[in-house]
């Protein structure tokens, strides 16, 4: 009913609006007495100190949350992090041993590919930490430890609030590793955690763009294809934006690392093709920012219709943006939490405009329990 959907036409929009709470609830209780506490874990500080390599395995949006996490975990811990699709992982004989931490991310905790990846990792003696949104599901039951996301039940088939909560949970894992290994001082860990907590309010602010983005969605509903570009943590955001559009609007959509533009994707640019560009902060990542500005000017010169997600007050990007969506300034590693939100709304509204069921897209299941 409309009441269940919080007055919205579809659950997904309600769940998009629940994202500030999903973040706050996922972080709650995990910083006590000046320390990150993964209290649902059965991994000791010594276990975390023994880790010499991290694998992240997941499917779909959960996989994209892992791609985001790689930037943070490597930066904070100096441990190598490999992110792998669960369906590929166990079939290529990955190098695993007791010192490997495998982080298995799954909203449902029932995804067959991820479960099999967990079993494979444990059989090779790796330690497995599940990041899961569903209490007592199979993946956490078969893992060594679990860190629950608290996004609440997610009804929409396409993941939204669980995805943001996964990013936050992955960051907790990274900070816990950094704390145990001493690659960050306690005050730095405390500051990172405080910034993570503050991201919830930034996501609330982004929700102020919903009506603007919906209007843009209605405008783009007849497009044949949409490209998404990003760099650094904006790259997985571009992949997630493209996935959302495929899932919901049945539209051809691809996400690219913007630096790859000249190695192929630029050949796809033609008059009127919408290209969504996820900008880094002009202050936080000035070098990448200027490279992206030149990418946008190139594609605009070739006729692309540019949709630019940029930090509030980023004036340099304005001349190249046919549509500008402004998101609040947050630390670089937290940008995916704000920049993903408009892409979720955009995909949902394009789908609705095309007359599709946003909550139950064709051919897809909320949890995929066969390999
Ligand atoms: C399905 C859903 C996606 C989700 C993926 C992984 O494909 O439609 O939204 O990201 O499964 O699900 P999981 O429950 O393992 O996170």
Image (tube, grey):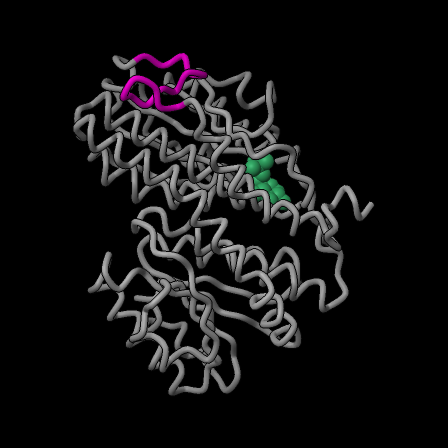
User: Which image quarter holds the C terminus?
Assistant: top right
Measuring from the top left, give residue 9's x and y in whole percent: 75, 55
> Quadrant of the rendered structure where residue 187 is?
top left
> Quadrant of the rendered structure where residue 36 is?
top left
Q: How many marks?
A: 0
Measuring from the top left, give residue 39's x and y in whole percent: 41, 16
Q: Is residue 32 magenta?
A: yes
User: Which image quarter holds the N terminus?
Assistant: top right
- Magenta span covers which residues? 30-44
Q: Is residue 35 magenta?
A: yes
175 sits to left or right of 2: left
Give the residue drawn at x 65%, y 63%. 349
Give the residue drawn at x 46%, y 41%. 85
Measuring from the top left, give residue 100's x and y in whole percent: 31, 24
Measuring from the top left, give residue 19's x and y in whole percent: 54, 43
Observer-nearest of 251 and 69: 69
249 sits to left or right of 29: right
Observer-nearest of 92 and 139: 139
Give the residue drawn at x 72%, y 46%. 6
Give the residue drawn at x 32%, y 47%. 333
Q: Main secondary structure of the magenta part?
A: loop
- Ligand 1, seen in the image, is in the quarter at top right
* 134 lies above or below 86: above
Q: Residue furthest right?
A: 1
């Amino acid at each position: 009913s409309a009441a269940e959907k919080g007055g919205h036409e579809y659950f997904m929009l309600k769940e998009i609006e629940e994202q500030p709470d999903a973040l706050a609830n996922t972080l709650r209780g995990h910083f006590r007495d000046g320390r990150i506490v993964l209290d649902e874990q059965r991994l000791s500080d010594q276990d975390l100190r023994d880790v010499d390599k991290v694998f992240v395995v997941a499917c779909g949006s959960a996989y994209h949350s892992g791609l985001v996490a790689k930037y943070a975990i490597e930066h904070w811990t100096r441990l190598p992090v490999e992110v792998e699709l669960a369906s590929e992982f166990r079939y290529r004989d990955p190098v695993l041993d007791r010192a490997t931490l495998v982080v298995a991310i799954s909203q449902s905790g029932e995804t067959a590919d991820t479960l099999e990846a967990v079993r494979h990792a444990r059989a090779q003696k790796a330690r497995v930490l599940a990041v899961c949104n569903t209490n007592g599901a199979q993946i956490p039951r078969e893992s060594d430890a679990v860190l629950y996301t608290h996004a609440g039940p997610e009804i929409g088939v396409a993941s939204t609030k669980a995805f943001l909560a996964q990013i936050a949970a992955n960051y907790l894992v990274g900070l816990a590793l950094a704390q145990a290994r001493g690659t960050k001082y306690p005050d730095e860990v405390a500051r990172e955690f405080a910034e993570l907590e503050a991201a919830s309010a930034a996501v609330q602010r982004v929700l102020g763009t919903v009506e603007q983005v919906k209007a843009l969605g209605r405008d783009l509903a007849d497009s044949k294809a949409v490209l998404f570009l990003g760099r650094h943590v904006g790259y997985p955001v571009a992949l997630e934006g493209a996935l959302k559009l495929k899932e919901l609007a049945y539209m051809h959509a691809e996400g690219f690392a913007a630096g790859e533009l000249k190695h192929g994707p630029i050949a796809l640019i033609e008059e009127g093709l919408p290209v969504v560009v996820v900008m880094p902060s002009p202050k936080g990542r000035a070098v990448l920012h200027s490279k992206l500005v030149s990418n946008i000017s190139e594609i605009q010169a070739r006729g692309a219709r540019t949709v630019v997600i940029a930090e509030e007050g980023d004036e340099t990007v304005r001349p190249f943006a046919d549509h500008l969506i402004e998101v609040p300034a947050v630390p670089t590693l937290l940008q995916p939490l704000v920049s993903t939100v408009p892409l979720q709304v955009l995909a949902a509204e394009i789908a609705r405009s095309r007359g599709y069921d946003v909550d139950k897209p064709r051919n897809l299941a909320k949890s995929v329990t066969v390999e």
